[in-house]
Image (cartoon, rainbow, N blue to C red):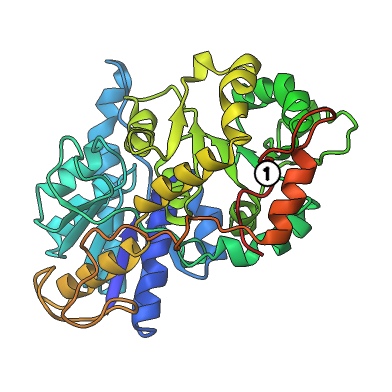
């Protein structure tokens, strides 16, 4: 079976495609997977690093205003479609799976021309132009959101890496904290703005870091490669670890109790899969997709939402910090976030793709995928259950140490903001 995946440009398009590729290989090692991308996208680095073949075609972005550049679009599009068709012919593709972005539009048109079956996956709450085009050519359409706008498809969730989907945060927690140089007896706030960092998050954190640490909360801060030099960490007993970028996100998630972050589709999918509550700061671009990504999580009690323009040190100190130090509140939010997690979207989509490639109809009994028993496609919504007693369960020793650490001179001991009820 030969599968071509079209998803390039940003990590939001590439990572779901690679998660699907891994699920396909896990199901059947003989499946050939080729990724289609453009030379300007992150796929030139991410795809080869994961061990998959990459073929490049020209990017054809649509001008956002009426300019002479519009006159060049037909010719460039025709060239991209032709080159995508050559890839389909060379690989002998049995199916094309598109994830949106610049590369998917030409790929869908080429697949239609070459009679290659098409599967569409839309990660965002508002479908993009490329996927709306692809959906015109197929009935095999899948979405990450139950109420995706401008596209009708089957809700399965967003494919994420098995490294994250199978993560046991409780078991890995102490090791993860040791990896970053953090203590095991205090809670951790993870602050990340994505691969490049986020200056607005960095600025707000700078004015609140002292108050956060004074409350006994550690900070793990991925500032971004270009911003790392701007972060000043004042001395103090409570750890504040700043790094340019975190490659081992499984360890970062295991070390953390709460996250301050953007609200990209992949971020929201991963945090709910591992049961981490977050304060989401949507990137103020596009049609508000990031806000829509986070909104269902917030509405179910699994997170907080603050506009980028409203984020400040005062908000962190006055609104977020009281939550971080409230053990019961964090536990409740963790459970709510976990209840929305969809850990097997990669396997559900892989099963559908294999059926389409084999000439069957997605959803019919047929090929099986690891983790999804035959005849039982894992496409139904299954909330991630919280362990009995809550998402976190403290040891007696940890509770005692937390209460001791939280006591103030002249005040009775009270529940302290230690490692929020996580068993060790």
For disc 1, the neighbor class at 10 Å (few under 14, some 14 to 19, many from 20) is many
Residue 373 lies, in percent from the top left, at: 25, 81
Q: Which residue is mark 1?
A: 188
| Among the 4 quarters of the image, the one containing residue 284 | top left
Q: Is residue 48 left or right of 190 when viewed as pictured?
A: left
- Between residues 371 and 323, which one lies in front from this camera angle? 323
Residue 112 lies, in percent from the top left, at: 13, 56
Q: Is residue 51 left or right of 28 when viewed as pictured?
A: right
Residue 132 lies, in percent from the top left, at: 17, 41
- Between residues 136 and 227, which one lies in front from this camera angle? 227
Above or below for 274 versus 374: above
At x 22% / y 35%, what residue is drawn?
A: 74
Residue 396 lies, in percent from the top left, at: 68, 60
- Between residues 161 and 61, which one lies in front from this camera angle? 161
Quadrant assignment for the N terminus: bottom left
| Among the 4 quarters of the image, the one containing residue 97 | bottom left
- Between residues 372 and 35, which one lies in front from this camera angle? 372
Above or below for 306 versus 109: above
Is label 1 in a helix, a strand or a loop?
strand
Q: Is residue 38 visible?
A: no
At x 44% / y 54%, what residue is drawn?
A: 15
Q: Is residue 403 visible?
A: yes
| Among the 4 quarters of the image, the one containing residue 159 | bottom left
At x 47% / y 58%, what residue is drawn?
A: 389
């Amino acid at each position: 079976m030969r599968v071509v995946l079209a998803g390039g440009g940003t990590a939001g398009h590439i990572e779901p495609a690679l998660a699907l590729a891994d699920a396909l290989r896990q199901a059947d090692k003989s499946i050939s997977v080729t990724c289609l991308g453009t030379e300007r996208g992150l796929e030139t680095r991410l795809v080869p690093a994961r061990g998959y073949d990459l073929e490049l075609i020209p990017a054809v972005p649509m001008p956002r205003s009426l300019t002479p550049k519009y006159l060049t679009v037909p010719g460039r599009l025709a060239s991209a479609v032709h080159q995508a068709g050559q890839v389909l012919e060379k690989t002998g593709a049995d199916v094309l799976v598109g994830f949106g972005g610049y590369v998917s539009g030409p790929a869908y048109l080429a697949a239609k021309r070459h009679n290659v079956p098409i599967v569409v996956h839309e990660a965002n709450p508002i479908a993009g132009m490329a996927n709306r085009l692809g959906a015109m050519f197929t009935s095999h359409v899948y979405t990450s959101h139950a109420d995706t706008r401008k596209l009708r498809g089957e809700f399965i969730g967003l494919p994420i890496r098995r490294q994250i989907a199978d993560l046991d945060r409780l078991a890995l927690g102490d090791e993860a904290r040791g990896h970053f140089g953090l203590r095991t007896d205090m809670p951790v706030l993870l602050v990340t703005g994505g691969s490049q960092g986020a200056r607005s998050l960095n600025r707000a954190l700078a004015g609140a870091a002292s108050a956060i640490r004074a409350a006994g909360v550690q900070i793990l801060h991925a500032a971004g490669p270009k911003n790392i030099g701007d972060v000043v960490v004042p001395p103090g007993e409570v750890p504040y670890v700043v790094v340019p970028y975190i490659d081992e996100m499984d360890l970062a998630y295991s070390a953390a109790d709460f996250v301050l972050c953007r609200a990209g589709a992949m971020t929201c999918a991963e945090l709910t899969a591992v049961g981490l509550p977050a304060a989401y700061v949507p990137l103020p671009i596009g049609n508000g997709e990031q806000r829509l990504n986070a909104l269902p999580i917030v509405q179910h009690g699994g997170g907080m939402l603050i506009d980028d323009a409203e984020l400040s040190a005062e908000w962190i100190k006055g609104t977020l910090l009281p939550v971080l130090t409230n053990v019961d509140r964090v536990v409740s939010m963790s459970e709510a976030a976990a209840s929305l997690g969809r850990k097997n979207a990669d396997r559900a989509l892989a099963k559908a793709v294999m059926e389409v490639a084999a000439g069957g109809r997605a959803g019919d009994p047929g090929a099986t995928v690891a983790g999804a028993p035959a005849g039982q496609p894992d496409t139904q919504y299954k909330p991630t259950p919280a362990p009995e007693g809550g998402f976190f369960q403290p040891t007696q020793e940890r509770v005692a140490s937390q209460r001791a650490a939280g006591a103030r001179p002249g005040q009775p001991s009270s529940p302290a903001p230690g490692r929020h009820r996580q068993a060790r």
